[in-house]
């Protein structure tokens, strides 16, 4: 709950103290002799020296202290401070590289430590709380997020971070990365789109026919309970057989492995949240509203589009949001059956014990899910009537 | 004019409405009153074809409603229900503009009509038009519901327990508004309620229903004076029938009018012409007076009403 500006804020100081503890205890970064061998960890002081340690400590203390003081405009100041801190966070790793990276080794690289992630995470939480206190508009929140991304992008392009292991992995695989991105998006969004259409039809059928409700809900719930790996695996044999039997399918690139079984499995998983939300949303339109609409002389078509669907849309979009996030995550697993996408890097990295290659697959997957969440939530906020 | 001839409605084995005949004249308010399950709502919903009838004829201005396209039929019949049925995702203005919108009125005319109705129902076009239904009180929401029903300027108004969910004070206020608006617009109205006082107050004629049949169809006064059966008698309640009778007449009908309005004595309580005789009697008991002056809106004394005149209402 937002409280009056005069009240001391307790959340931000607690977060700041937690961040301070973690950043001093955990390793900020690691210097690795090459991509596989375990490296030497460096804490905040070891990595950045007195100057860096002072800046980080002072910033966290200042933010925590400021939040407890009844200073007017403290939250706008905090917002600017925290956004700037997050923007330039990668400079800490750059300091580590400058100070600790052996100059004579072409394979030496910098890994990101738990301390860095903790700091980034807690700063982000503090910024979220600040935005909440400010009752910041979506516009402002989006601007802050974009500024932070811009900051990281600029930092990543600087010479000093060229030795960052993650970036090295990226540079090695830049082409594959772009391809993985497009495959990942096509697979997950394609599955969401197809299952949205299917779910809509199924939900309509369930609304119309009472006897279909239990079996249909049971079926889509059952599909959800199959472990994803198993479903991917189970689809290989029948699809391979189909593809053998029908040359048309072969020409389309449908085989036992690859995108076809992945897409099918993703659609199967997406059906439950979509069908359930669409069905519930349509059923929950108040009977009185429909009665009034009909009594006022609206046609069934007008009632469906202007009243029922309109009222159901926020819940349906919520279903699409959950499904999209889920599908983006599951697509990473689909790399196991050769579907491509960011999962490829994750499984390659696991195979080669190269954790930064795993990160190269995992981070963009998380980022895509967050972006999908933000876009679809924004869509819903815009539709909700004012209060 | 609405005519129901031998109209029956069955739900499976049960007969909800059992061969009723009812004529509702143009411009009158016909109140269907009875306990729940007596078939009054079913009757109403058959008029605008929200429910199909099992047998019989329903004619509106001589034309069978089954021969009219249901949407066209309903666009010409305002419909108000107890739970308002306002569209929660539309503003008040858009809710009221629904029928004009369906009738494809030009935007300008629609907007004008919405403002006109907001004013008529005692809402503020400036502030209330842009609000959403969940921001309104129960009384305001039902005002919007009535405004929406009137928006297309229909000939007929169907109201299904419109004030049933409101508190007593708001209900009475809306009943007053309804009388005022009806005097102005003269819509042929079918009004369903289980509240006999509401029926006596609003009706031109009352149709008392029980078990799918019409027990008595007459003016409020006639029903009060000669209830057709013990059922009607019980519905009226025996305790305050005299007071109910007084409530049907206004002070203006029985007062002795002064030839010239005069200045009232400063300390007396006055009545209005529109006050019911029941209110007048209550005031006299309270004031311990045998007569009270009747004041105009401007505060002039226009006449006088005496206690014995009130008591002569039942000859």
Image (cartoon, helix red, strand yellow):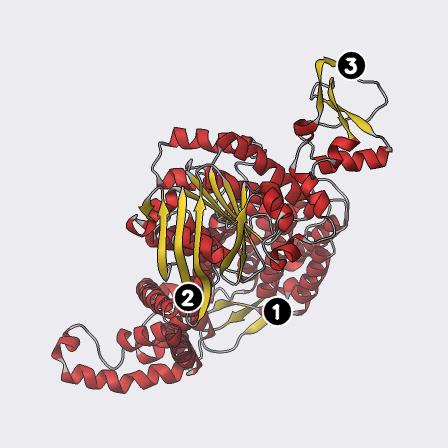
Q: Are the two marked residues, 1 and 2, in contact with CB atoms closer than 8 angstroms?
A: no
Q: In which quarter of the image is residue A96?
A: bottom right
Q: Which residue is drawn at 59% across and 59% down?
A: B35
Callout 3: chain: B
Q: Which residue is drawn at 27% across and 80% down?
A: A257
Q: How far apart are marks 1 and 2 (CA)?
A: 80 Å
Callout 2: chain: B
Disc with the residue nearer the chain's start (3 vs 2): 2
Q: Distance between the residues labelled 3 and 1?
A: 95 Å
Which residue is nearer to you in this view: A262 or A299? A299
SS state under label 3: loop
Judging by the rendered image, the residue that carries numbered circle 3 is B263
| Residue A27's disc number | 1
| Residue B254's disc number | none
Q: Residue at x 64, y 46 (%)?
A: B225
Judging by the rendered image, the residue that carries numbered circle 2 is B10
């Amino acid at each position: 709950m937002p409280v009056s500006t005069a009240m001391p804020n307790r959340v931000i100081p607690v977060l700041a103290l937690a961040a301070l503890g973690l950043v001093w205890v955990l390793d900020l970064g690691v210097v690795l002799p090459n991509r596989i061998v375990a490296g030497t960890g460096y804490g905040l002081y070891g990595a950045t020296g007195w100057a860096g340690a002072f800046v980080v400590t002072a910033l966290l203390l200042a933010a925590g202290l400021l939040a407890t003081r009844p200073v007017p405009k403290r939250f706008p100041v905090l917002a600017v401070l925290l956004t700037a801190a997050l923007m330039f966070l990668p400079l800490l790793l750059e300091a580590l590289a400058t100070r600790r990276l052996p100059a004579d080794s072409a394979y030496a690289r910098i890994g990101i430590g738990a301390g860095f992630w903790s700091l980034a995470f807690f700063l982000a939480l503090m910024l979220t709380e600040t935005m909440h206190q400010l009752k910041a508009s979506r516009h402002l929140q989006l601007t802050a997020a974009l500024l932070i991304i811009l900051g990281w992008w600029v930092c990543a392009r600087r010479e000093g971070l060229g030795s960052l292991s993650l970036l090295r992995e990226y540079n090695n695989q830049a082409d594959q990365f772009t391809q993985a991105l497009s495959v990942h998006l096509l697979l997950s969004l394609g599955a969401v789109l197809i299952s949205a259409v299917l779910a809509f039809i199924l939900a309509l059928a369930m609304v119309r026919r009472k006897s279909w409700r239990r079996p249909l809900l049971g079926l889509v719930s059952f599909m959800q309970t199959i472990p994803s790996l198993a479903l991917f695996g189970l689809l290989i044999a029948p699809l391979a057989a189909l593809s053998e039997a029908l040359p048309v399918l072969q020409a389309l690139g449908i085989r036992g492995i690859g995108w076809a079984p992945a897409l099918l499995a993703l659609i199967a998983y997406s059906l439950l949240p979509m069908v359930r939300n669409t069905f519930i949303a349509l059923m929950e339109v108040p009977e009185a509203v429909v009665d009034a609409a009909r009594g006022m002389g609206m046609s069934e078509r007008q009632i469906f589009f202007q009243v029922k669907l309109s009222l159901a849309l926020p819940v349906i979009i919520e279903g699409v949001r959950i499904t999209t996030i889920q599908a983006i995550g599951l697509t990473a697993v689909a790399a196991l059956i050769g579907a491509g996408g960011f999962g490829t890097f994750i499984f390659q990295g696991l195979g080669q014990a190269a954790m930064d290659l795993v990160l190269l697959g995992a981070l963009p997957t998380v980022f895509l899910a967050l972006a999908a969440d933000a876009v679809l939530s924004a869509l819903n906020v815009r539709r909700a009537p004012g209060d | 004019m609405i005519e129901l001839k031998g109209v029956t409605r069955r739900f499976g084995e049960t007969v909800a409405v059992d061969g009723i005949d009812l004529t509702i004249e143009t411009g009158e308010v016909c109140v269907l009153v009875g306990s729940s399950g007596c078939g009054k709502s079913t009757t109403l919903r058959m008029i605008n074809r929200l429910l199909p009838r099992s047998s019989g004829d329903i004619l509106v201005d001589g034309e069978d409603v089954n021969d009219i396209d249901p949407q066209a039929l309903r666009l010409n019949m305002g419909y108000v229900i107890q739970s308002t049925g306002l569209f929660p995702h539309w503003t008040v203005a858009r809710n009221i503009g629904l029928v004009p919108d369906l009738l494809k009125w030009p935007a300008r005319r629609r907007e004008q009509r919405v403002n006109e109705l907001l004013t008529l129902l005692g809402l503020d076009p400036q502030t209330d038009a842009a609000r959403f239904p969940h921001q309104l009180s129960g009384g305001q929401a039902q005002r919007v519901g009535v405004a929406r029903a009137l928006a297309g300027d229909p000939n007929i108004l169907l109201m299904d327990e419109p004030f049933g969910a409101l508190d007593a004070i708001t209900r009475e206020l809306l009943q007053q508004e309804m009388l005022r608006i009806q005097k102005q617009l003269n819509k042929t109205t079918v009004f369903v309620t289980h509240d006999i006082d509401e029926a006596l107050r609003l009706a031109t004629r009352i149709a008392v229903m029980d078990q799918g049949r019409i027990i008595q169809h007459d003016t409020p006064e006639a029903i009060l004076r000669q209830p057709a059966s013990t059922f009607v008698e019980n519905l009226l309640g025996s305790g305050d029938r005299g007071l109910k009778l007084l409530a049907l007449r206004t002070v203006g009908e029985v007062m002795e009018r002064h030839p010239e309005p005069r200045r009232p004595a400063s300390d007396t309580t006055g009545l209005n012409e529109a006050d019911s005789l029941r209110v007048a009697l209550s005031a006299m008991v309270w004031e311990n007076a045998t007569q009270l002056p009747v004041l105009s809106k401007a505060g002039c004394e226009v006449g006088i009403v005496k206690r014995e005149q009130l008591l002569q209402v039942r000859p």
